[in-house]
Amino acid sequence: MSLHTRNFSIIAHIDHGKSTLADRILELTQALPAREMKAQVLDAMDLERERGITIKAHAVTVGHRARDGETYKLNIIDTPGHVDFSYEVSRALKACEGVLLLVDASQGVEAQTLANFYLARENRLSIIPVINKIDLSLADVDHTKEQIEQVLGVDASEAILVSAKEGTNVGDVLEAIVRRIPAPRGRPQAPLKALVFDSWFNAFRGVVALVRVVNGELRVGSEIVLMSNGRRFRVEELGIFTPKPRVEERLGPGDVGYMMAGVKDVADMRVGDTITELRNQNARPLQGFREPKPMVFAGFYPIRTKDHGALHDALHKLRLNDSAFTFAPDKSDALGLGFRCGFLGLLHMEIVQERLEREFDLDLITTAPNVSYRVTLTNKEVVEVNVPSQMPERGRIERIEEPILEAAVFTPAEHVGPILDLLEKRRGVQKRFEYIASDRVHIVYDIPLSEVVMDFYDKLKSASRGYASLDYRVVDMRAAKLVKLDILVNDIPVDALSMVVPRERAYEKGKALVKKLKSYLPRQLFEVPLQAAIGRDVIARETVKAMRKNVIAKCYGGDVTRKRKLLEKQREGKKRMKTVGSVQIPQEAFLAILEV
Ligand code: GDP
Ligand code: MG
């Protein structure tokens, strides 16, 4: 039976047509009645899940009658398309024997094409190159093939040429999946081994796990053991997504589906864990994957102090579904009680922040994102610092190390100049520079993560008119000459504005930061000095002048409705303000660091 199963993922750079190709495959295999088919149907189901209505369909099973007359069961395992979530790609690939490597014929090989290709190769999967968008007049199939061979070292002669949009040659893709991707191995009589490759919390059903059975059988009612923690559960429900959930009595070798087993906490059913049965407890677990590690940190503080408890609840709820993000209580002199949160990257941070505001109706002040430093003190003690204001005093520090990325950029050759400038300015060190076609360049740099978390991606996009693509991974911790820069508003240090910067750039940064802050601070009734300091040395200063008297005078007497409007406006403006000492600081000011 598993001879007729094929498990695969579609991997691609963003916008190269993954969702569109998945739509065509669902249509061709008649997984959904035509009237229920809509564009990017799997993405739509995922959104619904986010709101807690349906469960997600990240693994879809369809039936396909191949040209040999046999019927095959195809499991399509979905992967996200952003660098922040490459660990999610890697865990999905653990459930597959092969991938469709999709490349847009009008764009060629991009940064995430290469990154995903590496993941597939590491997992020893069969790779079927598929060249998409051949209907476009800008499509250049020969060039794309050339890049696939040059950059990926894959034979492109058997690449399948498709238009996912128009449905051209999608049947050939299905045929290639059946012919070129091996059937899963594994025996139904063998002791149970199944991999949890995704899990999430459903408010009504508890934890739902996506599983890939490798050996043996999962059956409703049977008792299972999780190898990592020895906990036992009884299987309550099994099923597959077609893409609608369909209940099954058992899942056998090669099968991919969902399982519910009365698990109340996602921490008990961790992604990467191996499910087994009592008689097999001493077997070796399946190879899981690296735990995602937060790389970017920021403080979240409620605007209204009374929302602190609500924020805590909300963070806890979000974490049930997203084990990649972390939080810990934190206290800021300037912002009060809040939480220090860790994220995989900036996009991840934005998603969490948006969900907190939208789904939980919380108004937050967010501090500028920063990285985690490894600090060796003069007494040889080593500490992790992920709050800049908590960087120890200069005199106690022997060495500071920061995370270093290997960043790969793909760009049309005409934009190389400004891109190299940008990389150099951000303390990058060139490792590789190659032409992958006459007009396309692949550049690899080592660059500090702290230089990328700010606005690097936007800058890269504008340096290349939007054409460059980026992928990166942390490769190292490296010593650097860094100092803590403090900001004082009205002579009071504002801890949430502290930042860690390269020593040789501290002066320039301090100057730029107080200047930027000045533009964000509303005038007060009194003069407010803004200072940047390293330890006790003030290195830059600006002054916010006092409000002119007649501005206030206008509010007195006169038209009552106008006065009320003014007050209302003021209240609106205050929504995102924090009072430090006697000065009101708006949210934007806390992010000014991003702009210098
Ligand atoms: P994903 O990010 O990889 O999931 O890409 P999508 O499937 O969302 O496609 C990105 C964009 O490319 C959408 O606007 C699609 O309509 C378009 N697209 C996808 N496949 C084709 C194709 O074969 N031809 C053309 N012309 N456009 C396509
Ligand atoms: Mg998509």
Image (tube, grey):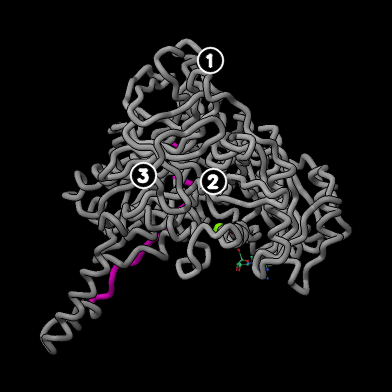
Judging by the rendered image, the residue that carries numbered circle 1 is 284
Q: Quadrant of residue 87?
A: top right
Tell me the amino acid under the disc marked 1: Arg
Q: Which of 314 and 142 is in front in this view?
A: 142
Magenta residues span 533-549
- Compared across the picture, whether 35 is left or right of 548 comes to right
Camera sees residue 188: yes
Tell me: residue 416, above or below residue 548.
above
Camera sees residue 395: no
Q: Where is residue 6 in the image (x, y as percent from the top left)?
A: 62, 41
Tell me: residue 268, above or below residue 102.
above
Mark 2 residue crowding within 10 angstroms, few (<14) / some (14–19) / many (20+): some
> What is the CA distance from the residue labelled 2 to the residue labelled 3?
19 Å
Identify the disc placed on residue 84: 2
Residue depicted at x 76% and y 67% = 134
- Compared across the picture, whether 472 is left or right of 273 comes to right
Q: Which element type, helix, strand or loop, lies under badge 1?
A: loop
Q: Residue furthest right?
A: 438
Q: Count numbered badges in the picture.
A: 3
Identify the disc placed on residue 299: 3
- Which of pointers 1 and 2 lies earlier in the amino acid sequence? 2
Is the CB–ligand 1 distance for label 2 below 8 Å?
no
Residue depicted at x 81% and y 60% = 413
Q: Residue furthest front?
A: 69
